Image: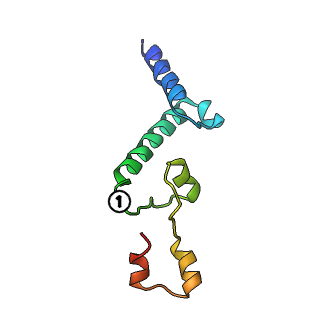
């Protein structure tokens, strides 16, 4: 009975989550971890939609795109500092 329930959970993940890498599909534990991380990412994005700007520590642009976060207005503080030479407190306030 446990095996049947486990199979149903894994099948549901495969049917309902898009873009699962092939390497993850081959390992049931990796598949469960991947599904859980996708759920957490979705929760973070949903909670942050009403905010003017947010980021996820350690996330790359690719990670943010996979989470469904648009980078239309994204401004890197490093790129801005290169343009201006140095940043002030007002520059950081205007990033969002």
Report x, y in % for residue 22.
Answer: 65, 34
- Check the image and report above or below for 94 versus 6: below
Residue 93 position by quadrant: bottom left
Task: Farthest residue to the front: give it.
Answer: 72
Q: Quadrant of the N terminus?
A: top left
Image quadrant where one finds the C terminus = bottom left
2 to the left or right of 81: left
Q: Who is closer to the viewer here, 20 or 1?
A: 20
Q: Position of residue 62 (x, y in %)?
A: 58, 54
Q: Quadrant of residue 20?
A: top right
Pick the front one: 60 or 30: 60
Q: Quadrant of residue 23?
A: top right
**69 shown above or below 4:** below
35 lies above or below 80: above
Q: Residue at x 49, y 53 (%)?
A: 69
Residue 14, position in %: x, y? 54, 27
Task: Name the residue located 54 percent from the left edge and 29 percent from the top edge.
Answer: 28
In percent of the image, x 41 and y 50: which residue is there? 45
Asked if 11 appears above or below 45 in the picture, the reply is above
Q: Residue furthest bottom?
A: 85
Q: Which residue is mark 1?
A: 51
Q: Residue at x 39, y 83 (%)?
A: 89
């Amino acid at each position: 009975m446990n095996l049947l329930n486990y199979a149903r959970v894994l099948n549901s993940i495969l049917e309902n989550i898009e873009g699962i890498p092939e390497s993850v599909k081959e390992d049931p534990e990796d598949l469960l971890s991947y599904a859980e991380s996708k759920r957490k990412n979705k929760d973070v994005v949903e909670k942050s939609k009403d905010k003017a700007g947010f980021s996820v520590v350690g996330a790359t642009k690719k990670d943010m795109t996979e989470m469904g976060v648009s980078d239309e207005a994204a401004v890197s503080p490093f790129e801005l500092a290169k343009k201006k030479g140095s940043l002030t407190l007002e520059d950081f306030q205007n990033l969002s």
